[in-house]
Image (cartoon, helix red, strand yellow):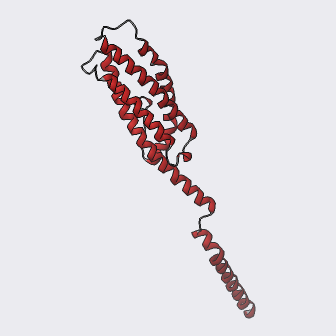
């Protein structure tokens, strides 16, 4: 009986040694884990997406600044304000700035890591905004030359409506995709009317 008990103890000890050895050789690497190629690709993709989002955020900040100047100029032309003779240049500069932003968006490093739908929405928004800005510049020049003796309707002002509406729809679509990602990375979110 004593021999049987001793044998059982030895058997348990051997099983324990085998288990510990197997865990040491096969369990530890998995637990500490060399990253798999798929993990590495996923990590690189996430880093590229974040970097591209940060760069895009910089372009959006410039767009917000342009938008603020445009809204001020629109109001000034509407009320025949003190800056009426300078307002056409505000719209012209805004159109040129948006064109530059479009060029930068096309060449944005890592843009393939971002949503293609989101980029298409922003491209459409800026393209239509450029058209609206150009029409608004013509409207402002007309009002300045007439010294605010306005016709019942101005063709250039009316022409700006359609591209402005298309731009607004594209901005809304863009913001729906941008804001969740921006929140994830701690970047500014925007209302469509700000862009």
Quadrant position of residue 81: top left
Residue 87 is at least partly visible in this image? yes
Q: Residue furthest top?
A: 152
In the drawing, does residue 135 fall left or right of residue 75? right
Is the residue 91 above or below the residue 175 in the image? above
Compare residues 85 and 164 and report the one nearer the observer.
85
Residue 76: % across, % down: 30, 20
Residue 161: % across, % down: 46, 18
Residue 173 is at least partly visible in this image? no
In the drawing, does residue 125 fall left or right of residue 64? right
Residue 146: % across, % down: 31, 10
In the drawing, does residue 169 fall left or right of residue 136? right
Residue 95: % across, % down: 41, 29
Quadrant position of residue 28: bottom right
Residue depicted at x 55% and y 35%: 120
Q: Residue furthest bottom?
A: 3
Is the residue 53 above or below the residue 7 in the image? above
């Amino acid at each position: 009986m004593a021999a049987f008990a001793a044998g059982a103890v030895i058997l348990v000890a051997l099983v324990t040694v085998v288990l510990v050895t197997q865990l040491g050789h096969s369990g530890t690497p998995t637990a500490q884990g060399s990253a798999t190629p798929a993990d590495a690709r996923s990590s690189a993709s996430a880093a590229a997406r974040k970097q591209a989002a940060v760069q895009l955020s910089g372009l959006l900040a410039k767009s917000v600044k342009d938008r603020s100047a445009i809204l001020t100029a629109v109001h000034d032309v509407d009320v025949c304000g003190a800056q009426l003779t300078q307002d056409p240049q505000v719209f012209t500069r805004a159109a040129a700035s948006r064109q530059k932003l479009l060029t930068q968006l096309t060449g944005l490093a890592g843009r393939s890591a971002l949503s293609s739908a989101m980029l298409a929405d922003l491209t459409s928004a800026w393209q239509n905004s450029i058209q609206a800005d150009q029409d608004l510049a013509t409207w402002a020049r007309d009002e300045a030359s007439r010294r605010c003796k306005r016709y019942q309707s101005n063709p250039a002002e009316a022409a700006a409506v359609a591209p402005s509406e298309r731009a607004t729809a594209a901005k809304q679509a863009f913001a729906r995709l941008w804001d969740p990602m921006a929140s994830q990375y701690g970047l500014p979110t925007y209302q469509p009317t700000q862009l």
